[in-house]
Image (cartoon, rainbow, N blue to C red):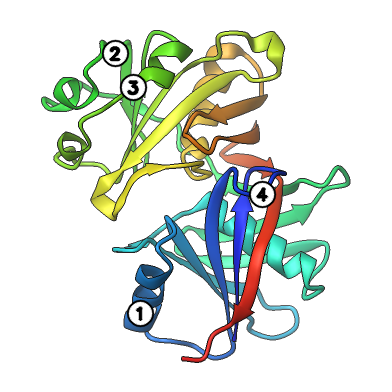
Amino acid sequence: MRIFTVDSFTDQPFKGNPAAVCLLETPRSDEWMQALASEMRHSETAFVLGQGKGAPYLLRWFTPEAEVALCGHATLASAHVLYSIGAASGLIDFSTKSGILTTEQLDHGRISMDFPSYLPAEISPPSTLGEALGVPVTWVGMGRLDLLVEVESEQVVRDLTPDIDAFAAIEARAVCVTARAADPAGGVDYVSRFFAPRVGVPEDPVTGSAHCMLAPYWSAKLGSDSLVGAQLSRRGGIVHTRVHGDRTQLSGHAVTIWSGELHV
């Protein structure tokens, strides 16, 4: 079976977020998929299984330590692979643990993904949050899966050196730290970083699923349905977002780094 590594939410190799994409020929066990994801060591490995003409592809995502219910960058990578090898065109439907997710190849080279929106609800900060971050916070909320923390400025987000072990004690899949962009005229509206040690990812380079929470949050604050978010990890990446009702459209570029054959 074929396997690929794809850098997502970037148009440059070795930037954005790398994902492995495995095109399954037959169903495999959860244990086998988890073992391969641990072998690949990317933040997510996507497993794609075709079900015949007209049926959605089955899509599942695994970190090196656990299966996750939603992953944006590995969905983008999966769609990119199917488009680039000629296996699909137009709209692609993926059947996932978060429902049917649809992708589309856009004229300007980006791939769009129709995802659910998860507007976070304000909560009291967890007792260990201050210890984990080491900086003051201005707002804390909980989305479907992750904790969202707004801080004072883009520079604070850039300079964070959090206590990753303390994050692991917080009851959430991950902690997403965000702020308004320092210069919105530069083409970016908000910035973020994403820490998920509970699922084996100390810091994720670019997190599509987090923007299902970030996009409705910042769209409500900034009064615009269409925004651009930058994730300020070492690799960095750009996510274009558009909120429409209870859905968020995420779009970005992707680049294939290598492909090969699995012999197991």
Question: Which numbered dot is residue 137?
Answer: 2
What whole-number distance in Å separates the C-alpha atoms at marks 3 and 4?
26 Å
Q: Position of residue 85 (x, y in %)?
A: 78, 72
Q: In the picture, residue 240 is in which quadrant?
A: top right
Residue visible at 34% across and 77% down in the picture:
35
- Where is mark 3, residue-wise? 160
Q: Quadrant of the N terminus?
A: bottom right
Q: Dot 1 surroundings within 10 Å: few (below 14), some, or many (20 or more)? A: few
Q: Position of residue 86 (x, y in %)?
A: 82, 73
Residue furthest right as drawn? 107
Nearer the observer, 73 or 171: 73
- The amino acid on which the numbered mark 4 sits, given as a three-letter code, is Pro
Q: Which of marks 2 and 1 precedes in the sequence?
A: 1
Q: Which of marks 4 and 3 precedes in the sequence?
A: 4
Q: In the picture, residue 89 is in which quadrant?
A: bottom right
Q: Are marks 3 and 2 in contact (CB under 8 Å)?
A: no
Nearer the observer, 14 or 65: 14
- Where is mark 4, residue-wise? 13
Nearer the observer, 88 or 109: 109
For residue 180, side relative to residue 87 (left or right): left
Q: Is residue 114 above or below residue 24?
A: above
Residue visible at 51% across and 23% down in the picture:
191
Q: Are marks 1 and 2 in contact (CB under 8 Å)?
A: no
- The amino acid on which the numbered mark 1 sits, given as a three-letter code, is Asp
- The amino acid on which the numbered mark 3 sits, given as a three-letter code, is Leu
Question: Which SS class for mark 4?
Answer: loop
What whole-number distance in Å separates the C-alpha atoms at marks 1 and 2?
39 Å
Question: Which SS class for mark 2?
Answer: loop
Question: Which numbered dot is residue 30?
Answer: 1
Q: Dot 4 surroundings within 10 Å: few (below 14), some, or many (20 or more)? A: some
